[in-house]
Amino acid sequence: MKLAPQSVPYRALQKVSGIVVVLFFVVNNNPEWGLAPAAAVAGAVVLAAFAYEVAYYRRFDYELTEDTLDISSGVISRREREIPYRRIQNVDVSRSVIQRAIGVAAVDLETAGGSSTEGSIRFVVPDEATRLQREVQRRKSTGSDTKTDGESADRPGSEASGRTDAGPGAVGPDEEELFAISPGELALVGALSFDGRLIGLLAFLSSGSVPVLSSFIPDASAVALTATAIVGVGGLFLVSWVLGAGIAFSNYYGFRLSRAGDELRYERGLFRRYSGSIPTEKVQALRIADNPAKRALGYASLSIETAGYAPGQGGDQGSQAAVPIASTDRVYRLAREVESFGEPSFHRPPKRIRWRYAFRYALVVGAFVAVAYGVNWYFGAGAPWYAPVALLLAVPPAAHLKWKHRGYWLGDDHLLTRNGFWSRTVTVVPYYRIQNVIDTRTVFQRRWDVATIVADTAGSSSIAGNDAAAVDFATDEAVDLRETLRERLRASVAEHRDRRDRFEWFAGDAEGAGDDGEPAGEGDEPVPDTAGSAPDGDELIPDADDEASSEGDDERRSDVPDDGVIRPDFSGSGRDYSEPAERIDTGEYAVDRNPSDMGGDGRNEDDEGGTDSVDDETDDVGGEANDVDDASDDER
Amino acid sequence: MTTQTLHPRVQVVWVLRAVLIAAVLTAPFVGGVYLDRLPEWAPIAAGAVFLVLGVGHALLRYRRWSYEIREDALYLDRGVVTQVRTTVPLVRIQHVDSRRGPVERGVGLASCVVYTAGSRGADVRIPGLTPDGASDLREELKRLAIRADGEDAV
């Protein structure tokens, strides 16, 4: 498939605009150059950009194959990339005002690996973008194996997806709307948004110009100066607020969250239109945030975290699928739709910990007083430097509130943690999504005999430091919590595996094949049983091992007789199986042309043995495993 | 597997690092003396303080460090000022590296890095292993991780 033709001039102009601006400044600063050469250079640059973009357009190609989305791109250095559907975390489509005017859309595909967008298709026509989005989802659900079914079977609403009968020709499942922002809510989002960037920018700019400014100051009287300062700061805050309101308004205009089968879809934006999809099975954590104002009014916000790197997350808003604001019970209802946790009742840290916070705040007040004293002494102003002592009155309530809003709760399948008074965040982490559990005790915490337990997930915003943490719990309780989390993770993994194995058993059975979400046609021509012995350990086998180890692996694996492991019935396929599977190095990560985890029937109890788990990145046996899967794919 | 401690020679690596850091931190004091802004004893005192703190930290760190492979998880206990105990469930291990830096090679040691998909504890490093020990640990963790059968972790 090709890009939209109108993307060529758009991309070219996009690229050139920066260069032209630079050129403009260069010419401005060197008047002797004259206009004509500048125009010539600009023209040449534009032409070059056009030529490049035409080449880019001609050489960019993407294709939806059975198992992967293949993108080949690059004018000078070619890149062929294959992204298995199962690995795609979210598909995002965005359209800015100009893009909407000329009728193109940008498609970004996120996988969990890497910190950047894995697949970026710029630009296609909007219909094609939507088609890509739907098609990726459809192929993911039909092409994925029984494991996905197992994973999603316990999720509410997935029964209604109609996914089990989604054959290759079926259209995507119906959408069920979960949330749509109301005008009142949108107004609230705007009113509660405040953009601090302007203030930051001004502070940054003025920090360099203080000496310049201070030379003007003595001219004015103190009263006029104070009045100007107050008006200026007030105006600044007003502008920041209006700016924040405007940005929030344009970001969340027409926000809509819906569920389609196993997938959440969102849409938002006034000027730049965003839409995207998140597979529910890839949700890592939910985050429900509020602040005192929102609590008083009964509102909260919700964000949904996936392991993929959410676009725009570095810059403006958090997760793309965040519900900016809604009444608290609506937020909880929505959150339970995604992850069915029960009615939480939080455990608070021990009461004595309030003393710790009180000490901490008292120290802060002390520091304030010291700074005030120092400033006063330095300028000899004789101001009441001890005034901040009055803040000590606020220390006990602050300590109490801090304690009051901390807590954790262990649900049936989820860990909930709660932290913060000014911006209180409740984090919902399914036990199954816990990656590791970290128990930290600082020197001060040890003095109070408390510890902090962090349940680390692959969610992206925990990079910013707001993980699911149970802070300041008594050491014994913390150790218990740590062990409980480990145990529940183990139990939930076992449960998932059980369910998966059960489905596999059906998958091997010709009669049961139609019942478990396998594509139609599977039952007509059962895949040979031996094909099922393709190992599934490939996901966790250390594929980034050093070379030395993979060599060692090769030696050990060569002991395994080729025919002892895998010898399926190859009839019905024209492939030459004496050759190892074709492998492609995409540069940033290697992908199999026939990933063994894509096959619907690629697992059975054999993988418990461990020894037959084959690293398909490094050796020929693994290559054959892929061939086996390919065989089963051909059967379909 | 019982609780394992690190190879004592890892203290050499850490003490060397502490000396290096102390030297870097002392440099401004030396500069101060050259510019006649500080008395001559200042760099010596500062250097001594940094050295004692750094070396003490390195030695305590060695004493605190321990790891253990239990039935379903890898436990690490470390940290002097802030004690950190990490539980890495074996099912969540993505891949395992063994690596040897130049200093480690100098004293004949290696370390082992365990990666998970988590964002905060994404990679945990077990330093102070003998080269054989590091590859053994790597193989052991790999074997256990396969046995634990981690399916799609994210």
Image (spheres, helix red, strand yellow):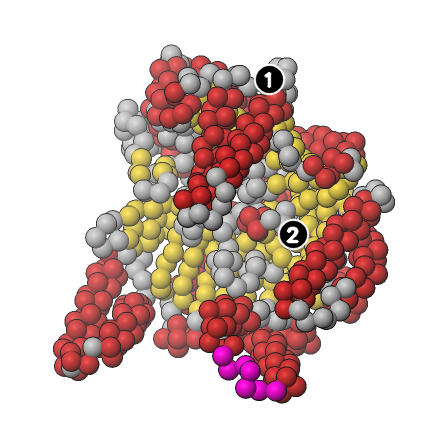
Seen at 56% across and 58% down, the residue is A319
Residue A555, image x, y percentages: 35, 15
Q: Give residue A557's position: percent from left, percent from top.
A: 39, 17
What residue did someone put label 2 on?
A286
Q: Chain of mark 1?
A: B
Q: Which residue is mark 1?
A: B4
Residue at image point 49% right, 51% down: A309
Q: Residues within 10 Å of mark 1 (few under 14, many from 20)?
A: few
For the residue pair A293 and A534, the one nearer the viewer reads as: A293
Residue A559 screen position, x and y as percent: 38, 12
The nearer-to-camera label among 1 and 2 is: 1
Mark 2 chain: A
Which quadrant is the C terminus of chain A positioned in? top left
Task: Please report the bounds of the magenta region as a residue range.
Answer: A215-221
Q: Secondary structure at mark 1?
A: loop
User: At 37% from the left edge and 40% from the top edge, which residue is drawn?
Assistant: A589
